[in-house]
Image: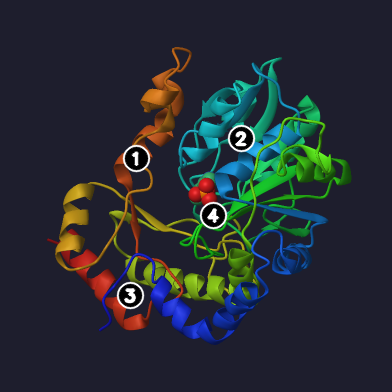
Amino acid sequence: MKKIQMVDLKGQYQGIKDIVNPSIQEVIETTAFINGPKVHEFQKNLERYLNVKHVIPCANGTDALQIAMMGLGLKPGDEVITADFTFAATVEVIALLNLTPVLVDVNEDDFNINIEAIKKAITPKTKAIVPVHLFGQCANMEAIMEIADANNLFVIEDNAQAIGSTYTYKDGRKLKAGTIGHVASTSFFPSKNLGCYGDGGAIFTNDDELAHRIRGIVNHGMYERYHHDVVGVNSRLDSIQAAVLDAKLPHLDAYNKARRHAAGKYNKAFKDIESIITPKTVNGCDGICDTCDCHVFHQYTLRVKGVDRDALAKHLNEHDIPCGVYYPIPLHNQKAYVDSRYNEADFKITNQLVKDVISLPMHTELDDEQIEFITLTLIKFING
Ligand SMILES: *Cc1c(COP(=O)(O)O)cnc(C)c1O
């Protein structure tokens, strides 16, 4: 059996080497390292894939979030509602821009931002909601867009973990994650579902005016060379990274399908184990059917009940099975983001999830033998 890895980038590279290498080589030969033709080609191809009017590449997913908020013209003191159970980047940029982060609780079943908690957190100062499509599945965007419309709020989708997933409305209408809100951000960090070989990110929007503003912001606030109309940043996607991404984009659906296949195998193996709660897909399709991309399993995250989670993690590691706890501390308890206005009683679910969750190896190269070894090792621990 191949050594099990949390993410197997080496194995994935072997399969696409013949496309990726010449694509990188071409950038080197032409020396168009910054804003070269590859960046534009990738941008156009991603716009087509997502069916969105504008993709604006930038340096990483954290920048993408920050630039999206700058583009919307959010001002110091504006309140921005986001999930308590996520990676810190989301709340970090809110705080960096001197906006006021308002963390709210999530759902127990899909780990995404809770709709009632959003409603409860809205004040006259609220300007935006940032749903994070955690672990590869969209938050309840239909309800979030309704709340935003009713309260005149912007919606910024943090789509770093769900690129390629599809959101289905109650009436059957489908949209790609990251094309539903007013603007969205994504990350091309190597381990993300569409990852490059360094840092990278992008902003998506269907709003022409906003796209224009953002294109200036990523480039020092310049709309005309050496005319700085607004305060901007320097945030670019390297041509070499764009070459990697453009070579990988045609494989994204197959990669996501491989992740779903692995998730399906895990789900099946754990189906009858009472103390394990497998990840729920909101439209009830189990996330594993071939016609549905509702979940792209950036992470495969279980909840364990009545089991010593940390002892389980140790047991897996002892059998050379890597695993992770995403995320071990609620954001509202992180030193940088404590706020006396928060009330522990409002974070019941996050406070519980941080104790229960464990993520298993999930990537495009997992084979059935590895999955069987992982599931048997885990079940053996649980059954004592
Ligand atoms: C990875 C990630 C980011 C940040 O992306 P970087 O490219 O690492 O800056 C932001 N939000 C979420 C939810 C992420 O998973």
Locate residue 45 relative to residue 66 in the image: left or right: right
Residue tagged by mark 4? 161
> Residue 144: which quarter of the image?
top right
Contact check, label 3 and label 4, Cβ < 8 Å: no
| 67 to 378, vertically: above or below | above
**Between marks 3 and 4 in the image, the one whose residue lies nearer the viewer:** 4
Which of the labelled discs sits on residue 354, or is there none? Answer: 1
Under mark 3, the amino acid is Ile
Q: Real-space Cα distance between discs 1 and 3?
A: 24 Å
Disc 3 or 2, which lies upstream in sequence? 2
The tag earlier along the polypeptide, 1 or 3, is: 1
Quadrant of the rendered structure where residue 181 is?
A: top right
Judging depth in this view, the residue of 236 and 354 nearest the camera is: 236
Q: Earlier in the sequence, mark 1 or mark 2?
A: 2
x, y percentage for residue 366? 39, 76
Q: Residue at x 87, y 46 (%)?
A: 208
Q: Secondary structure at mark 4?
A: loop
Q: Amino acid at mark 4?
A: Gln
Residue at image point 16% right, 60% down: 315
Residue found farthest to the bottom: 18
Query: Separation of disc 1 and disc 2 at Cα?
Result: 20 Å
Query: The N terminus is located in which quarter?
Result: bottom left
Report whether the residue tagged 4 is closer than 8 Å to ligand 1.
yes
Q: Residue 169 location in percent, x, y? A: 74, 53
Where does label 3 land, which residue?
Answer: 371
Q: Earlier in the sequence, mark 4 or mark 2?
A: 2
Disc nearest the viewer among 4 and 2: 4
CA gap between label 4 and label 2 equals 20 Å
Q: Position of residue 371 (x, y in %)?
A: 33, 75
Mark 2 — residue? 115
* 312 or 282: nearer the viewer: 312
